[in-house]
Amino acid sequence: MTGTLALVGGGEWRDGCSFDAGLLAASGGTDVLILPTAAAYEKPDQAVESAKRWFASLGATAIGVMVVGRADAADEANVAAVRSARFIYVGDGSPLHLRSVLKESPLWQALEEAWRGGAVLAGSSAGAMVLGDPMVDPRGGAFTLGLGLLENVAVLPHASTWSHDRVHRTIKLAPASVALAAIDEQTALIRSSDGSWSVDGVGEVSIYRSGEEVGLEALPS
């Protein structure tokens, strides 16, 4: 049985992210390991500080693990920290950079092992996008390879900010076997440890398959 998984549409670590309290409870602890990898070129230290302030307000401690390049994803101390964590949160930024750093790395293997061993895993925007396969390509809304923690699931974050035409194009381009989750900011699509799915937060989640809107039952258990 895996741990809880939260796919967040963006706008993480701020008021409205009511689901974080439940994720903390599911982890059974008060520490959250923050991976600011996707923000490597966008002040990752500030991302960690935002997470620290937010989780402190929830009575928890956020700990930044500064994995910003490929060498960091092979560092033994970083890998060990991820492997032993009970709550791992992958922040927003560039999904393409995040994918290039984590792909086939020791740290990615440790993250998978932690989640499959029962740890809570959350990813926001870029952090959510890379977890599926295929992945929505941020350069145009088509599809590219993801890291494949979830097969045949793709995440479209910040959904309420996309134009109707861009969303429609992405839905049309999605392979028939893929469940495309369009997730608003400060909103989480959550897979519990028993494989059931739910939605929490201030916005909405829409699931599309074969060009049609479907329910959460279209997602893999």
Image (cartoon, rainbow, N blue to C red):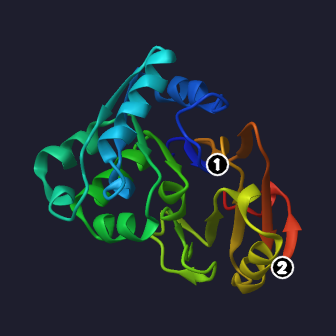
Q: Residue furthest top?
A: 59
Q: Quadrant of residue 103?
A: bottom left
Image position, residue 109 (x, y; %):
30, 59
Q: Quadrant of residue 182?
A: bottom right
Q: Is label 1 in a helix, a strand or a loop?
A: loop
**Left or right of 154: which side holds 211?**
right
- The residue shown at (26%, 42%) is 65
Tag 1: residue type? Gly
Can residue 2 be seen by looking at this rendering?
no
The location of residue 84, given as percent across then percent down, is: 27, 37
Position of the C terminus by quadrant = bottom right
Crowd band around label 2 with a 10 angstrom C-alpha radius: few (<14), some (14–19), many (20+):
some
Q: Nearer the viewer, residue 221 or 25?
A: 25
Q: Is residue 202 left or right of residue 40?
A: right
Residue where numbered disc 2 is placed: 211
Q: Identify the residue at image location x=67%, y=61%.
A: 220
Q: Residue at x 74, y 76 (%)?
A: 166
Disc marking residue 15: none
* Residue 3 % position (x, y): 50, 42
User: Quick check: 8 above or below 177?
Assistant: above
Q: Looking at this view, is 199 or 171 the one in front?
A: 171
Q: Is residue 161 among the parts visible in the rendering?
A: yes
Disc 2 is placed on an element classified as: loop
Count neighbours of disc 1 (C-alpha within 10 A) and say few if under 14, some if 14 to 19, many if 20 or more.
Answer: some
What residue lies at 70% left-to-right and 46% top-to-bottom?
A: 196
What is the distance, in whole Å, between disc 2 and disc 1 at their CAs? Answer: 24 Å
Residue 49 lies, with reference to residue 99, above or below; the image says above
Which three-letter amino acid code belongs to the residue tagged 2?
Gly
Residue identifier under label 1: 195
Q: Which label lies toward us, 2 or 1?
A: 2
Lower sequence index among marks 2 and 1: 1
